[in-house]
Image (spheres, rainbow, N blue to C red):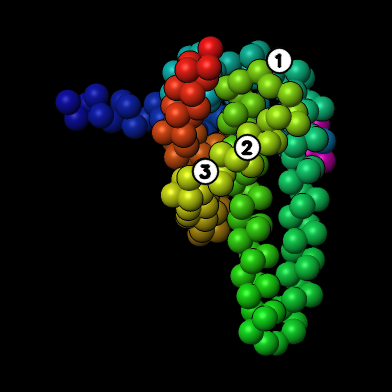
Amino acid sequence: MVGKALETLFIKIWVIVKLNLFFWLFSCCGLIVAGVGPALKTVNELFVSHEFNYKDITLKEGWAIFKRNFIRGNIIFYALFVLLALLAYNLFLSVQIQGLPFLMIDFLLVFAMIYGGVTYQYTLLLDSYYEIGLKNLLKLAFISTLSNFTNLLKIAIGISLILFVTWKFKGLILFGTFSMIQIWSFTATKSWRQTIDQRLELHA
């Protein structure tokens, strides 16, 4: 029984490492600037499709997904990037002004940045599950993030912990950080995806 548990643990670690290496490989294929968005989407879609079945996660399939989602992945990623950049700039300006009203504005801006990051994770997951237009995808992701505050907290806290551990152990940037974020988001939103499937079945 211990042997089986260890085998399962090693398989999960290998999947995390494998997907994270895929992320860096595909990011470099897009010269980082045009590669990060599609690479994140590729890692997300590979895990959604195969979870911890490591033999089914192949470079060939990953490359096909990366090419297919190159433009869409960049659009989604840079929409988030621009949003976070604007919010961060406004936060930078706001923290320089003292007073309770501006403290409340700071809080709202920080929450908006967290909300934007979680919505991005929902967007990647939903896009991996359903064939849906970009406009409707963004609407569904926005609604999904609002629909369950507990899930929003779970994703935000989980990502924060992953980034904190990464800050302590820098090697995770190469071997685990980005894949762990995608896997955690997948795990944290399982109940909501089941709810969506049930509602789609009712309207089928």
User: Is residue 128 inside the magenta stretch?
Assistant: no
Kind of residue sitting beneath label 2: Ala
185 to 112, vertically: above or below: above
Q: Amino acid at mark 1?
A: Ala
The mark found on residue 64 in the picture is 1
Asked whether the residues under the numbered discs 1 and 3 touch, taking CB atoms below 8 Å apart as contact, a structural biologist would say no
CA gap, disc 2 and disc 3: 10 Å
Span colored in magenta: 29-33
* Mark 3, residue position: 147
**At which x and y percent is residue 172?**
54, 46
Task: Give 192 or 41, whichever is nearer the viewer.
Answer: 192
User: 147 or 188, which is in the foreground?
Assistant: 147
Q: On the rendered structure, is 109 left or right of 85? A: left
Image coordinates for residue 91, horizontal then vertical, percent: 73, 70
The image shows residue 78 at horizontal and vertical percentages of: 79, 42
Element under disc 1: helix
Between disc 2 and disc 1, the foreground one is 2
* Mark 2 vs mark 1, CA separation in Å: 25 Å
Residue at 82%, 41% (x, y): give it: 33
**Disc 1 or 3, which lies upstream in sequence?**
1
Q: Is any atom of residue 127 visible in this view? A: yes
Quarter holding the N terminus? top left
Which numbered disc, 2 or 3, marks the residue closer to the eye?
A: 3
Asked which quadrant contains residue 6, the reply is top left
* Image disc number at residue 174: none
Task: Locate residue 123 relative to residue 202 in the image: left or right.
Answer: right
**In the rendered structure, which disc, 2 or 3, sits on the residue that comes first in sequence?**
2
- Mark 2 — residue? 141
**Residue contact between numbered discs 2 and 1, judged by CB atoms under 8 Å:** no
